[in-house]
């Protein structure tokens, strides 16, 4: 009698073969599905291009911001320019949006692009970056007030110093800064930058008897305003440059620098930020908010406006870059985490002059540079 010996491996192969084929089929199918999904998502992401003020460049380049926008179907390509230059550079039709600092810059863009849409995304007060020894000299001379974690600067008293060509060496209790330099805030180039334009707006209000300047202003006003800018000498077009001087070169080079509050907060909270406990903020009194207005030219850019205004993740990231928006609860939480004790609200806040008035003032000051 013959005995047939079965190979156990052949039985195993018969059982495993279909299972392995099924696994392979599922794997291939999943790969195809994920590949198709990636391709679909790639097709759904639209790329838009815009011109922005330099103070927002780091925000848009943050990987978290890039990912949040991509989640919403947007890829944003940016170029930076001085906020007052953006309107002129947008005229070539290559951009989907403009995002300057300040209402006047946004008004200029809208005036030149009928049908555009504006989004009031976030804002930041104007502030003056300084040093405790400098601030205390101003306090001793009745020009500033110590508010604890920050200072306020009496703009009327400060402008009197500029009008009378007062030097730091003329002030009392000036041992920490007894130099023969004019008491003068360093700003950006009035011809190109919004932060300088906001400095102009503040100063014009005070010099005009605490009234917003209209088109029929006194010619003497212009002479007082010119001194604020012409006496500075060379100035940078971007707000990041004088702030960098403040951070790197110390109070000898930059005792008083007009900045956006957002710049100071960002530097304070970032990892490795080179801030010392001698660096302080002075808030001009009166003050004004620089509103960052996104002006869009098509439906895809409007998606960006909606996202920056209302997406909770993006709102939180805006606050982490020092800007203020409608998410007051997270602003307070973030500030507490980083021991930021700046004013939650400013009381004496004004509006800038109309675009036409401030542009006219700037043009007349600009003529004196030539």
Image (cartoon, helix red, strand yellow):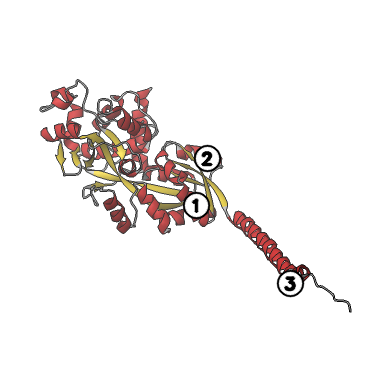
Q: Position of residue 125 (x, y in %)?
A: 29, 45
Q: Classify mark 1: helix, strand or loop.
A: helix
Residue 201 left/right relative to 176:
right
Is 178 placed above or below 84 here?
A: above
Q: On the image, numbered disc 1 is attached to which residue?
A: 67
Q: Position of residue 187 (x, y in %)?
A: 31, 32
Residue 111 left/right relative to 334:
right
Q: On the image, numbered disc 2 is attached to which residue?
A: 91
Which quadrant holds the N terminus?
Answer: bottom right
Q: Position of residue 246 (x, y in %)?
A: 30, 31
User: Going 76% across and 70% down the picture, which residue do you hit?
Assistant: 8
Calculate the distance from the C-alpha at mark 2 to the C-alpha at mark 1: 30 Å
Residue that protrudes farthest toward the top in the picture? 180
Camera-side residue: 165 or 172? Answer: 172
Camera-side residue: 263 or 107? Answer: 263
User: Going 82% across and 73% down the picture, which residue do you hit?
Assistant: 5
Q: On the image, numbered disc 3 is attached to which residue?
A: 15
User: Going 84% across and 75% down the picture, which residue do you hit?
Assistant: 4
Is 359 placed above or below 229 here?
A: below
Q: Tell me the mark number nearer the camera, choosing from 1 and 3.
A: 3
Is there a contact, CB below 8 Å, between mark 1 and mark 3? no
Residue 215 visible at all? no
Q: Tell me the mark number nearer the camera, choosing from 3 and 2.
A: 3
Tag 3: Cα neighbours inside 10 Å, few (<14), some, or many (≥20)? few
Tag 1: Cα neighbours inside 10 Å, few (<14), some, or many (≥20)? few
Is 56 placed above or below 368 here?
A: below
Is there a contact, CB below 8 Å, between mark 2 and mark 1? no
Q: Tell me the mark number nearer the camera, choosing from 2 and 1.
A: 1
Specify which label sits upstream in the sequence, 3 or 2: 3
Residue 310 left/right relative to 220:
right
């Amino acid at each position: 009698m013959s005995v047939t010996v079965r190979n156990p491996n052949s039985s195993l192969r018969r059982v495993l073969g279909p299972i392995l084929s099924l696994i392979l089929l599922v794997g291939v199918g999943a790969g195809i599905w994920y590949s198709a999904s990636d391709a679909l998502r790639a097709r759904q992401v639209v790329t838009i291009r815009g011109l922005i003020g330099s103070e927002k460049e780091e925000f848009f380049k943050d990987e978290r911001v890039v990912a949040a926008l991509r989640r919403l179907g947007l890829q944003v390509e940016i170029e930076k320019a001085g906020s007052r230059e953006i309107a002129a550079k947008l005229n070539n039709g290559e951009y989907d949006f403009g995002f300057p600092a300040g209402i006047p810059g946004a008004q200029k863009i809208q005036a030149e692009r009928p049908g555009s849409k504006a989004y009031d995304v976030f804002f930041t007060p104007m502030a003056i970056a300084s040093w405790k020894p400098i601030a205390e000299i101003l306090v001793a001379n009745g020009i500033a007030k110590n508010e604890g974690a920050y200072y306020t600067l009496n703009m009327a008293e400060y402008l009197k110093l500029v009008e009378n060509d007062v030097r730091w060496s003329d002030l009392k209790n000036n041992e920490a800064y007894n130099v023969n330099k004019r008491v003068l805030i360093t700003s950006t180039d009035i011809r190109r930058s919004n932060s300088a334009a906001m400095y102009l707006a503040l100063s014009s209000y005070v010099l005009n008897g605490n009234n917003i300047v209209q088109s029929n202003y006194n010619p003497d006003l212009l002479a007082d305003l010119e001194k604020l800018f012409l006496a500075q000498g060379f100035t940078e077009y971007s707000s990041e440059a004088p702030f960098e001087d403040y951070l790197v070169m110390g109070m000898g080079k930059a005792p008083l620098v007009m900045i956006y509050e957002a710049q100071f907060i960002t530097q304070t909270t970032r990892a490795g930020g080179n801030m010392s406990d001698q660096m302080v903020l002075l808030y001009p009194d009166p003050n004004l908010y620089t509103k960052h207005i996104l002006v869009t030219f098509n439906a895809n850019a409007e998606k960006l406006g909606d996202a920056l205004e209302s997406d909770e993740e993006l709102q939180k990231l805006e606050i982490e870059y020092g800007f203020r928006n409608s998410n007051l609860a997270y602003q307070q939480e973030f500030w507490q985490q980083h021991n930021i004790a700046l004013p939650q609200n400013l009381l004496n806040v004004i509006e800038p002059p109309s675009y036409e008035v401030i542009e006219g003032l700037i043009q007349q000051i600009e003529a004196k540079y030539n």
